Image: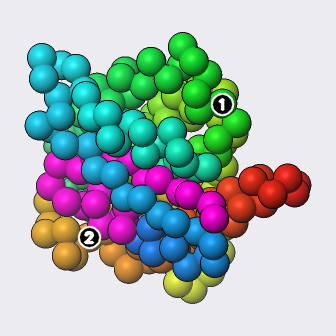
Amino acid sequence: MTRISIVYFSGSGHTTKMAEAIAKGAGAVAGTQVQVLPIQSEDIQNGRFKNDLLMASLDSSDGVIFGSPTYMGGPSGQFKCFADATGERWFKSAWRDKLAAGFTVSGGPSGDKLSTLHYFFTLAMQHGMVWVGQAETPMNDQGINRLSSYSGVMGQAMQEPPEAAPNAADKLTGEMFGRRVAEAAARWKRGGA
Ligand SMILES: Cc1cc2nc3c(=O)[nH]c(=O)nc-3n(C[C@H](O)[C@H](O)[C@H](O)COP(=O)(O)O)c2cc1C
């Protein structure tokens, strides 16, 4: 059994929709157990994130997919509070050699989403994790990876209700990405290339 965790923050629900799409794709890979772990603002007191259960779930994961909306050109403050709390794991190299990947949603077609993905990458590298990027090209009729992101998955959503955005193409991109990460984690776990 390969365990994939999606740990993410969402302020108004758009990033949640992308997390669900990624979970659907990962869950479609035989032998994969998916945990969807939202970062709750209530778990942040005086700027410190604390949720032992969530952290233990990540400890037991083979792959971790980080997600956040892009706010002011980077991950949300809530995600950063979570990331800071992972410092305890860094001291013990607890997440070394787990697979890592990331996704973000923001209003603009660019909107500086890449800064958020690159933050996730840096976090993963600090933990000694192994990064899985996006392999799909935008040359297709379904809008898969229409925003041409290779560091991770990008979705676009302004202020519309989360039922309307990210659109079907972005969610399909997320689904395919979830599958890719789950398949990579299974290969990594059994010692294949
Ligand atoms: C505080 C704040 C900052 C934002 N900054 C950006 C930004 O830098 N770039 C962008 O394209 N959209 C930005 N947006 C729009 C959000 O990224 C967008 O609405 C996204 O879908 C929100 O995701 P959520 O529903 O998961 O919170 C910002 C929204 C908020 C509330």
The N terminus: image quadrant = bottom right
- Residue 130 placement (x, y as % from top left): 69, 39
SS class, disc 2? loop
**Cβ of mark 2 under 8 A from ligand 1:** yes
Asked if residue 72 can be seen in this view, the reply is no
Q: Which residue is mark 2?
A: 165
Q: Residue at x 28, y 60 (%)?
A: 16
Q: Residues within 10 Å of mark 1 (few under 14, many from 20)?
A: some
Q: Is residue 144 left or right of residue 115?
A: right
Q: Quadrant of residue 125?
A: top right
For the residues labelled 2 and 1, say whether their Cβ atoms are less than 8 Å apart.
Answer: no
Q: Which residues are magenta?
A: 1-20
Q: Which residue is mark 1?
A: 96
User: Would you place residue 150 above or below residue 112 in this image?
Assistant: below
Quick check: is 136 in the magenta stretch?
A: no
Quick check: is 5 in the magenta stretch?
A: yes
Which of 20 and 72 lies nearest the eye of the viewer?
20
Q: Residue at x 37, y 21 (%)?
A: 84
Which amino acid does the dot numbered 2 rest on?
Ala
SS class, disc 1? loop
